[in-house]
Image (cartoon, rainbow, N blue to C red):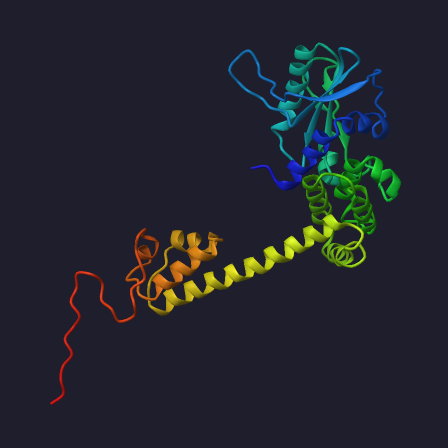
């Protein structure tokens, strides 16, 4: 399953297709033909035989017609299978769009970037694929707010590549300035990506700054932080209900199997947790807890169809 970081990086290039050719040209020194439009293309690179391959992203540069195509691959860890499929992506795409193609690998981790940059020998004399890798060394350290406002996606990419360094917090602050005026979903995504890329101490410091200095300046941050606090309080209430429910079941000697425990811990609906808690007081098994139509019995009242034991009179 793709991680948030992987999908977030791809969204940077999807939201701003010119980011890919600009990295190739400005950071990696690749000479590109003149172009007036950059657009995201289908990333399906299927052969004639029924085998489907899908690149992370394809960006097509056009000057009336396709003049250059870029396969964008996000790489967060080593994956030997990629060295088999990357050449296929390029040749397949070149055949489809009938123009030169290049492979751009985005790897925020330095060690992974070095691995990605190794030449891929294909066996035919002179047929060697040299991946073009945008690692931390190629991604600029962007702390200028004006530059970040012009290119918020590059600012986010910068903090993802350099967030663990001392300069990480400063880059993240430029992201906060850069996202002003963007739609709410992009703001949340970009700020989440920036914060998650920082070291713990830097992240906490920036969150504190957002709650004070930034709160009156950016109403969306205020709304976002308030929503986070409300969600945190709500989750705290849910957690209390879940713990109480498991405590009641344990106190009554009812065995909670792994599946039932996971179902309880995964529940985030207050009313459902309250219902299960009421049932737990009188249920004869954990399974009865989840049965539809089962109502909590008043304490001391026997289940339907059974007779209450007769009390013995004292003589």
In the image: residue 299, left or right of residue 238: left
What residue is drawn where x is 72% and y is 36%? 107
Q: Position of residue 201 (x, y in %)?
A: 75, 58
Question: On the image, which quarter does residue 47 sit in?
Answer: top right
| Left or right placement of residue 267 versus residue 137 in this view | left
Residue found 17% across the figure and 64% down from its top: 306
Q: Quadrant of residue 132?
A: top right
Q: Residue furthest bottom?
A: 315
Question: x, y percentage for residue 48?
Answer: 55, 11
Question: On the rendered image, what quadrant is the C terminus found in?
Answer: bottom left
Any part of residue 77 in sight: no
The location of residue 39, given as percent across then percent down, is 72, 21
Residue ID at (82%, 37%): 137
* Residue 289 placement (x, y as % from top left): 34, 57
Q: Total label count?
A: 0
Query: Which residue extends farthest left?
Result: 315
88, 276: nearer the viewer? 276
The answer, for residue 199, to whether it is visible in the render is yes
Tell me the quadrant of the picture where the N terminus can be found.
top right
Q: Is residue 289 above or below residue 182?
A: below
Q: Residue at x 61, y 18 (%)?
A: 45
As drawn, 85 above or below 214: above
Left or right position of 74 against 18:
left
Q: 230 and 97: which one is in front?
A: 230
């Amino acid at each position: 399953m793709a991680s948030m970081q992987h999908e977030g990086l791809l969204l940077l290039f999807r939201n701003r297709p010119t980011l890919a050719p600009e990295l190739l040209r400005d950071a990696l020194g690749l000479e590109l033909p003149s172009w007036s439009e950059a657009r995201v293309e289908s990333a399906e690179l299927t052969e004639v035989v029924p085998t489907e391959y899908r690149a992370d992203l394809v960006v097509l540069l056009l000057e009336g017609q396709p003049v250059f195509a870029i396969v964008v691959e996000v790489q967060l860890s080593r994956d030997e299978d990629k060295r088999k499929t990357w050449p296929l992506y390029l040749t397949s795409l070149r055949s489809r769009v009938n123009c030169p193609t290049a492979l751009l690998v985005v790897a925020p981790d330095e060690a992974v970037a070095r691995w990605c940059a190794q030449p891929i020998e294909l066996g035919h004399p002179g047929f060697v694929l040299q991946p073009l890798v945008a690692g931390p060394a190629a991604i600029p350290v962007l702390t200028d707010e004006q530059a970040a406002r012009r290119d918020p996606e590059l600012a986010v990419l910068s903090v993802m590549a350099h967030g663990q360094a001392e300069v990480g917090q400063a880059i993240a602050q430029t992201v906060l300035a850069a996202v002003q005026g963007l739609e709410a979903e992009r703001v949340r995504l970009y700020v989440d990506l920036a914060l998650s890329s920082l070291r713990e101490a830097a992240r906490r410091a920036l969150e504190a700054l957002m709650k004070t200095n930034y709160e009156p300046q950016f109403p969306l941050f205020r709304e976002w932080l308030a929503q986070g606090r409300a969600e945190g309080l709500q989750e705290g209430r849910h957690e209390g209900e879940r713990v109480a429910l498991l405590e009641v079941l344990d106190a009554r000697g009812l065995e909670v199997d792994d599946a039932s425990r996971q179902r309880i811990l995964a529940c985030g609906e207050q009313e459902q947790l309250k219902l299960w808690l009421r049932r737990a007081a009188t249920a004869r098994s954990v399974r009865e807890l989840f049965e539809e139509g089962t109502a909590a019995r008043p304490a001391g009242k026997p289940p339907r169809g059974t007779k209450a034991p007769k009390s013995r009179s004292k003589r």
